[in-house]
Image (spheres, grey):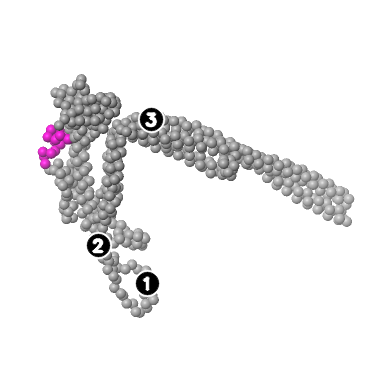
Amino acid sequence: MDWGTELWDQCDIIEKHTQSGLELVEKYVKFVKERTEIEQNYAKQLRNISKKYNVKRSSKDEQDCRLSSYQAFLDILNEMNDYAGQRELIAENMMMNICIDLTKYLQEIKLERKTYLMEAKKAQQNLESTYKQLDSSKKRFEREWREAERAAQYAEKTDQDINATKADVEKAKQQAHMRAHVAEECKNDYAAQLQKYNKEQQHFYFNDMPLIFNKLQDLDERRVRKLAQGYNLFSDTEKHVMPIIGKCLEGITKAGTSVNERNDSMVVIEQNKSGFERPGDLDFEDFSQGINRASSETSLSTPKGPMDLLGKNRGKNFWLFSKRSKRFTPERIMPTVTEDFTHLPPEQRRKRLQHKLDEIVKELQKEVDQSEALGKMKDVYEKNPQMGDPASLASQITQTSQNIERLRAELNKYEAWLAEAGGRGDTLRLRAFAFNNNGSHDIHSPDGAHSDESTPDTSQAIYAEFDDDFEDEELAAPIGTCTAMYNFPGASEGTISMQEGEELEVVEGDKGDGWTRVRRKNGDEGYIPTSYATITLSK
């Protein structure tokens, strides 16, 4: 079965379908390009994505963050950091084998499709032109034939008129004969045009358009095959590094199995129950006089009993009615959302304030960790000026300090509101609040100086940048040994390359960031991914 036979009358449908197919290829290329942009930024970009989806939350997400399904999603985002090892290779292969190849192919089939559509349009215009000639010939034949009939009738009438002269009769007959001759010529011309049109129409529907439609069908099938190859490449490119990222996939599976639907249901109940009692029965109102009229009038009004019992929360419980009637009663609109959540019932207000406090604490902890990292970076730059200018970190340190102060102010504000609502903070909040009030825990002094009392865990990027800081120090005693399971290029600053099966000394263990510091026998030191080696620590 082919388009030329089965879809001979669906030119518009074929045009839209082929255009939709090209748009699908473009959409897939854009999708892969976005994926490669993420991959090309290596581990940093992956962590940015995790941060993007962790930070930008809607009001609905704020309520859902206690759900196990939501927490599992956050765990999955955290697992994205473990993909950093082979992401650049994936990005390069996807860009070369999918994006560039499909983009070039897309331009070719676009041009080919345009050619076929132009042929179809030209054939259609030729057929329309022939039809216009046919219609013009038909109308002329119709007009001349009527004139001939009128001339013949006039000649017959003149011939029967006893008052007409012989010259008049002869003239009328000649006129009728001439008209009849012209009409016969128009008839022959119309017949010839009709035969020509029918022939071209048959050729149009049985030869020209089927051939063009079949070409478009072949083009579309080739596009589908090419796109399917792109789909397969998307998977195959990932499969080449699947053994290395297997541990991360296990973590994602663990996050999925940790979802507890029953617990989520309980959380929804706790977050959304209002605490109000159900409205009681309405009292009977006896309207003995004019009962029919009173019934019809009162049946359209809203009972006051339940609304009075619900109080301020009635707009929420009777939202459909409030929304439907708000054009007539402007005062019945949704209450304005306030920062201190006073628009909510007391129980819900306490929960929302507690939740907001927890978010501020987490954000404050992140800023504190970043402040510690910047402080250590500044110290390293001061000790090793060749690594960077300490002054270049001033703006970041200042911004981090300002963020910490802002969060402290918000923390105090929400603490006061929570106390007003009759609630209290939890252990996590008190732990972060200690950073606000205990001078010994401050990371930076007002001038941006770094305190040496804190020893925070740093990330992969910091390890990479500060590698040279250890060159001038005395070599530390190894704490174990490791054997490389995979090849590691060690292209980033601060890392060290290794070959599969190579044995190295472990100088510093993994602090939770996925990197271990090792040393070769020749004294070269650097960081390697923990998952790339089998590590045995000395007891």
Of labels 2 and 1, earlier in sequence is 2
Answer with the quarter of the image where residue 346 lies: bottom left
Q: Which three-letter amino acid code belongs to the residue tagged 1?
A: Glu
* Left-right relation of 174 to 303: right
Q: Which residue is identified by label 3? A: 93
Q: Position of residue 88 (x, y in %)?
A: 33, 30
Q: Nearer the viewer, residue 12 or 315?
A: 12
Q: Is residue 443 magenta?
A: yes
Q: Position of residue 22 (x, y in %)?
A: 47, 38
Q: Position of residue 49 (x, y in %)?
A: 30, 38
**Which residue is rendered at x = 16% and y = 30% of the image?**
538
Of labels 1 and 3, earlier in sequence is 3
Front of the two marks 3 and 2: 3
Reply above or below: 29 against 414: above
**Which residue is rendered at x = 24% and y = 62% of the image?**
276
Q: CA distance from mark 2 to mark 1?
A: 30 Å
Answer with the quarter of the image where residue 323 lies: bottom left
Q: Which mark is residue 276?
A: 2
Work out which quarter of the rendered image holds the N terminus and state it. Answer: top right
CB atoms of marks 1 and 3 within 8 Å = no
Q: Is residue 409 visible?
A: no
What is the magenta range?
Answer: 438-456
